[in-house]
Amino acid sequence: MGGPPGQSRGAPLPQPLHDSRPTQFIQMAKSRQDIRREYKSINHARRVLHGGRVLKFIIRGKMSQTPAGKSILVAGATGLVGRECVDLLLAQPAFTRITALVRRPLVNEIDSERLKIERVDFDRLDDRQEVFGVDSIVCALGTTMRQAGSEPAFRHVDFDFPLAVARIGIARGARHFLLVSSAGASAASGRFYLRVKGELEDAVTELGYPSLTIVRPSFLVGDRAEPRFGEGMARRWAFLFPARFRPVKATRVAAALVHAASEEAPGKRVIENREIQS
């Protein structure tokens, strides 16, 4: 068949002066590219952190609308929740500077220009105040009575260290403090563990952070370097627990923290175990 009148056969057709694709298709393509990049970041981080075993992670709802150029520090980045937080933060391009505060080296150090690993002596944090110049701080420090060996030693790790991190952070201009506490935490509790957690919550609240997020998970389950007593039973019989005390995956706790850090809502917010699970 011939071309349009006045145009010889074989002559090139006139090209459009602009991209004629509907705008929504262009936006959809860009959105798909963003999602692919997001999943690639998550999978890369998980491959490095978990020795090559890729774990599944489902992104639900809209991606965080985090202002570009945010900086965040994770205290306790070698722990169960802390390393998951680093994992998820690396998948959020808006967090352009991530500092991992650790006592010991990461099992598999992460090759990322956005991540800086700082090994510190938590008894001498005042000597390293420069690393606390960030927008937000996630505190996932903690131990167990079994590991600590005594009540004073436990309190030193679970109260003194986190409070020192919070104090230096607000002095250096941090606006948002995110604390991993415990379900049932209360300064009036008859249980030593829960009383220490509650006293820490109260002490951090008094510092006056513009934004304060406290998450209260129950028994944490996940891939630990050293399995804890009763964790297998907790996984198996989790459905028998009331929602407030039902065992929770560390990945869910980390997701709640990173989401809260992205929002940076003013005031104090307490996220209970039931909400973490939802």
Image: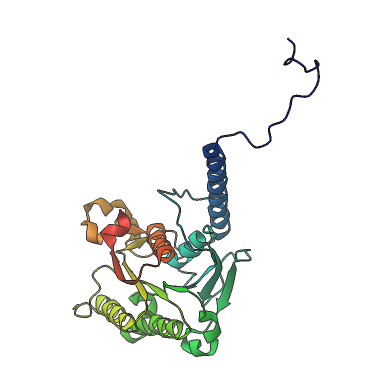
In the image, residue 218 above or below residue 133: above
Camera-side residue: 118 or 63?
Answer: 63
Residue visible at 30% across and 53% down in the picture: 278
Residue visible at 49% across and 63% down in the picture: 67
Picture coordinates of residue 227 (x, y %)?
41, 63
Residue 245 shows in this picture: yes
Q: Quadrant of residue 114?
A: bottom right
Camera-side residue: 265 or 233?
Answer: 265
Identify the colour scheme used: rainbow
Residue 47 placement, left or right of 155:
right
Picture coordinates of residue 63 (x, y %)?
45, 52
In the image, residue 206 above or below residue 263: below
Quarter of the image containing the N terminus? top right
Camera-side residue: 170 or 185?
Answer: 170
Residue 262 placement, left or right of 127:
left
Picture coordinates of residue 236 (x, y %)?
30, 51
Q: Quadrant of residue 190?
A: bottom left
Picture coordinates of residue 256 (x, y %)?
38, 61
Residue 7 placement, left or right of 95:
right
Residue visible at 41% across and 60% down in the picture: 259
Camera-side residue: 113 or 15?
Answer: 15
